[in-house]
Amino acid sequence: MSPEKLQTLEDIQKKLLWLACWTVHNANHLREKDDVKVGGHQASCASMTAIMTALYFHVLRPEDRVAVKPHASPVFHAIQYLAGNQTQEKLENFRGYGGAQSYPSRTKDIDDVDFSTGSVGLGVAITAFSSLVQDYIAARKWENAPDLGRMIALVGDAELDEGNIYECLQEGWKHNLRNCWWIIDYNRQSLDGVVREGLWERIEAIFGAFGWDVVRLKYGTLQKAAFEEPGGEALREWIDTCPNQLYSALTYQGGAAWRKRLMDDIGDQGDVTALLERRSDQDLSDLMNNLGGHCLHSLIEAFDAVDHDRPVCFLAYTIKGWGTPLAGHKDNHAGLMNKAQMAEFQKTMGVPEGEEWAPYSGLKDAQAAQDLVAKTPFFAKGTRRFESVPLPLPDLVWLDDAELSTQAGFGKILDQLARSDHALSDRIVTTSPDVTVSTNLGSWVNRRGLFAREAQADTFREENIPSTQKWSFGEDGQHFELGIAEMNLFLMLGAAGLSHSLFGERLIPIGTVYDPFVARGLDALNYACYQDARFIIAGTPSGITLAPEGGAHQSIGSQLIGISQDGLTSFEPAYLDELSVIMNWSFDYLQRDGEGDPDERTWLRDETGGAVYLRLTTRPIEQPHNRRDDADFHRGVIDGAYWWRPPSPNTELVIAYQGCVAPEVIEAAGRIGTDRRDIAVLAVTSSDRLQAGWFAAQRARRRGQADANCHVDRLMASVPSHAAIVTVTDGHPATLGWLGGVAGHKSIPLGVEHFGQTGTVADLYRHFGIDADAIVTAAQNLLPGRSIHGMGEAV
């Protein structure tokens, strides 16, 4: 690299540090705010500035993708500002309503964010799974198959405490990960203190064990030159053995403190003393702060030296708060320069008053910096979001089984799609955390195979050993078999669910997991939804209906996760025809990308699309005798509910249910109907969609749209005011317990609130009070006065 370009990059680095610190300062000290601290992370920005300068303005190409350390977001926004992808207005409103986000966000920032970050660790790990997805797409040689880029994570050293990072490392090793860089900001400070001594050795050992190349960037060019001087080896040895806390403290204290300590420890040697005396206090401070992670020359040299596609971990030594008055102080994570410090910092940075937001003011050669940014390859083609044409939908797959579970039906629908040559079938990619067979993906995998960049033989098949699993590995496989780590499952779904935007080729990702263990991956599920990743997750088997497995494998609150998780639409069908309609609709819903105007029939924002959660069960139940294929049925299933038995003006009781308790409800309705008139039954397929529409319609009414009525409003409007409601589900009673509040009906919610136990389905339904007897008893409590058939005296 020419000295001129290096000088220009140093100018840009200086400008980025200024803009990042000024953005945080403006948000906290200058603009109007309320009583809550705005925050920002000036010190965390400072430790990353050189690394990000080297990457964005020298190393990266448009096909590369970067997950930025959350606390370095002001540096990222500053980079995008110089590139023309961010506005001064949004920087001025950093962490304010409508401003640049606290942490880079694909969905809420206007600049070119590849991966949202914020929940630490997840932004790191998703780069590995995105690399696997990139390999998957590249192997298919589709029309828009991407040029292979590097998936890069900028990692805070304290993030390495997150367990999901190590789960990811093992999965990457299994799948022969490549084209992945993780650059660790090794500033040796965390939120509350200083990291343990010797962490670097553990980092290098762990990454090396999983097949990563590890590049240690400890010394900058000033330090390397000093080491060549007489006495330099002693200085190097002192640096290598200096405790992290002491190095940080001396950095904060400055050149005089460095001189005293070095003289006390090693300065009695003539060569070392001379080495120190040749430098002023400021020069000595600059030398000791010149770690590899702050030296553009060292960083670029290391990055440019990588000439292979093996995964690489760069361990970049840095100083938290480098170049600012906060440098090295153990409390600097959330620390902010005060106004006096900022004024002095502004002078040091050479930024004229009144030109704080000017992109290139105060630089030695502003034109050279502007020209370099304009010619930087990474920004040459503008923002790097792709679009993908929606895939046509296959014909709806109907199943003719007289009795079957929804879990088995899910597997059979996928098997039928696997047999077809439909374009959408070729875009389905499935994945599961070592529960592929037990969640009924086995038939799909038998037909479509497992993905691997290198073919792997099925030894059992070659040895003529009978097995139901005919699994072959190769580049044409359409299933990723993961280990037992639900965080990895949702990170894989998140990465695959962004393929249309990251790589220009759409996938239809489908994952399966035991329903109670959705909660084990909830942080990664939320992270995937926050990025607007598109996928289907089937939680199965679910509820206490998985009776013999006991409480550890039975889910209670997963329905509430489906209701509350933004970006995720949840369904819990009871019957196969409902499941067929939902899956076909879901294939379309995953691909939508509308503006978000609500459908004034349901008040749901369906045109925006999203991910889908199917809560399924292992319990086989008898299916309706006639296929229900009319438009009203389809609409009701998708909108969230339909009348299995509609109400009349004389209806006294409504039984509303969701999921596989349908047989108990039908039995109870028949028994109650012998003594009571017109028992109505409401089949709920999605409490999530019913409730979301209800909330949205209420908001619309508060805003003056008096005629805003949603699906559940219309359903409950047909129920007489004197009627009562019993709700029942194999899950938390709050799932449906809100239905009585829609039109003011008296109600009793039945469900499961405690950990289950082993037994038969009948045992557990009776124990938890969701069997037919319990439904009849609940009805009798709501409608006292005379006994209901088969239940003895009235309560």
Image (tube, rainbow, N blue to C red):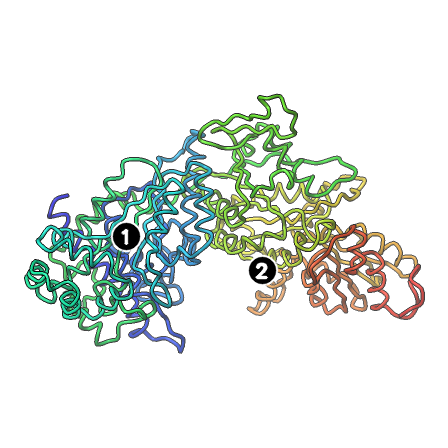
Left or right position of 271 against 541:
left
Q: Is residue 782 left or right of residue 306?
A: right
Residue 459 drawn at (x, y percent): 56, 25
Image coords of residue 230 (percent x, y): 8, 54
Few, some or many residues within 10 Å of mark 1 (<14, 14–19, 20+):
many
Instruction: Give the image location of residue 625, x and y in percent.
Output: 81, 40
Does residue 461 lie above or below 216 as drawn?
above
Residue at the spot x=82%, y=60% of the render?
775
Question: Which residue lies under the disc numbered 1?
Answer: 316
> For residue 652, which quarter of the picture?
bottom right
Q: Quadrant of residue 787?
A: bottom right
The residue carrying mark 2 is 564
Count of numbered badges drawn on the protein: 2
Q: Quadrant of the N terminus?
A: top left
- Which one is nearer the viewer's eye here, 414 or 551? 551
Q: Amino acid at mark 1?
A: Ala
- Which quadrant would the C terminus be assigned to in this image? bottom right
Q: Helix or strand or loop: what does disc 2 sit on?
A: helix
Mark 1–mark 2 Cα distance, whole angstroms, equals 40 Å
Residue 721, given in percent of the width and then of the height, sits at 78, 68
Q: Nearer the viewer, residue 288 or 368?
A: 288
| SS at badge 1 | strand
Residue 307 seen anywhere in this rendered image of the structure: yes
Q: Earlier in the sequence, mark 1 or mark 2?
A: 1
